[in-house]
Every structure is written in structure tokens, then in C-alpha cells.
Image (cartoon, rainbow, N blue to C red):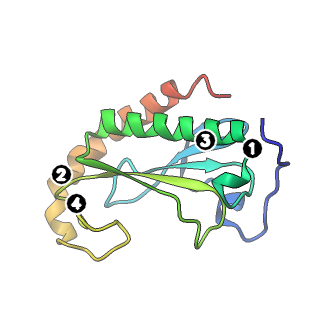
Amino acid sequence: MSQHPASPVAGCELCESMGGELLHQAGQFRVVLVDDEHYPGFCRVIWQDHIKEVTDLPELDRMLLMDVLWQVELVVREVMQPDKINLASFGNLVPHLHWHVIPRYADDTHFPQPIWGQEQRAFQSQAQPLKVRRERLQALRATIKQRLSAYL
């Protein structure tokens, strides 16, 4: 259990909004699906309290956060079938602890660059692969909800 009280911060995007489509919410974290047309299956694991760094959490909370992160990564890998998963936790623009779980494909718009980097190919060339990936989103939603159902 977190030793930090709920501490919303005015102006913090992740304190004031869900940060995406809510897939699972527990007392200490939530998992959302990001609406990103280039990257279907992009999820975020967001710590509920406004905490900046993983090391600001007590050990048990760090362990919980990492376990949830690994569970989300596994589901994204199983369902979305990416070539690679990118995990990122920056917090430079939004200093509220959260992890990005991003399925990557050798044919995606930015590969091998990070999704925030320079595009490597035209978005228009991605129509068919993106259609297939979007068709997997219902299964992703259901599987994440099922996999995290024990986390309250």
C-alpha cells in the first residue's frame, strides 16, 4: 500500500484526466489505452498519486508498479504481435510517474527511431498494417482487463 496520500497537482495532465481510455483502475495505478493513430495498442501504466520518480515509491509499491508494467507488456506482445516493445518513462513534460508500453513494428512510421523521433516512412503507406493492428484492439482491451482483474 502506498505511503503517499493522494496528491493531485493542478495543471498536471495525468492528475486531471485519465490519460487515455481506461482499461483497468486499481487503488494505486491505472492502465489506459492511448488513442494514437500511428500506434494501435500503445498503453500507459500510470501511478495514481502525483509522484515524479520510481525511487520515490516505497519498495512494495515499486514492485507492484513493475509487476503491472510487465503484465501489460506481456499482453501487448501476445495480442498485438509486435516486432519489439518500447518501454519509456520520461516525465519531462508531465512529471507524474507513468510508463509507456508501445508496440513497434519494422514497418511502422518511425522504426527504428523512437516514436517521438523523425518519421522514416510515409504514414499513408501504413493503411493495411494499421487496419490489421486496430482489429486486435478489442482483444487487447479484454485481455488486459482479464489479466489485471486480480489487482485491486
- How many discs appear? 4
- Which amino acid lies under the numbered mark 2 shown in the image of this protein? Pro
Say which residue appears at 22% left-offset and 68% top-offset: 123
The answer to which of marks 4 and 2 sits earlier in the sequence is 4
- Whether the residues at callouts 4 and 2 have beta carbons within 8 Å, the answer is yes
The answer to which of marks 1 and 3 sits earlier in the sequence is 1
Say if residue 53 shows up in the picture: yes
Q: Quadrant of residue 58?
A: top right
- Which amino acid lies under the numbered mark 1 shown in the image of this protein? Pro
- Which amino acid lies under the numbered mark 3 shown in the image of this protein? Leu
Badge 4 crowding class, 10 Å Cα cut-off, few under 14, some 14 to 19, many 20 or more, is many
Compared with 94, 26 (above or below) is above
- The residue nearer to you, when weighing 131 against 120, is 120
Q: Is residue 86 left or right of residue 13?
A: left
Q: Which residue is mark 2?
A: 129
Q: Which residue is mark 1?
A: 58
Q: Which mark is residue 108?
A: 4
Give the x, y percent position of residue 15: 71, 59
Say which residue appears at 62% left-offset and 37% top-offset: 63
What SS does tag 2 mark? helix
Q: Nearer the viewer, mark 1 or mark 2?
A: 1
- The residue nearer to you, when weighing 60 against 80, is 60
- Which amino acid lies under the numbered mark 4 shown in the image of this protein? Asp
Per the model, the C-alpha gap separating discs 2 and 3 is 32 Å
Q: Nearer the viewer, mark 4 or mark 2?
A: 4
Badge 1 crowding class, 10 Å Cα cut-off, few under 14, some 14 to 19, many 20 or more, is few
Q: Which residue is mark 3?
A: 65
What SS does tag 3 mark? helix
Q: Is residue 145 left or right of residue 81?
A: right
Compared with 128, 24 (above or below) is above
Give the x, y percent position of residue 135: 28, 41
Q: Nearer the viewer, mark 1 or mark 4?
A: 1
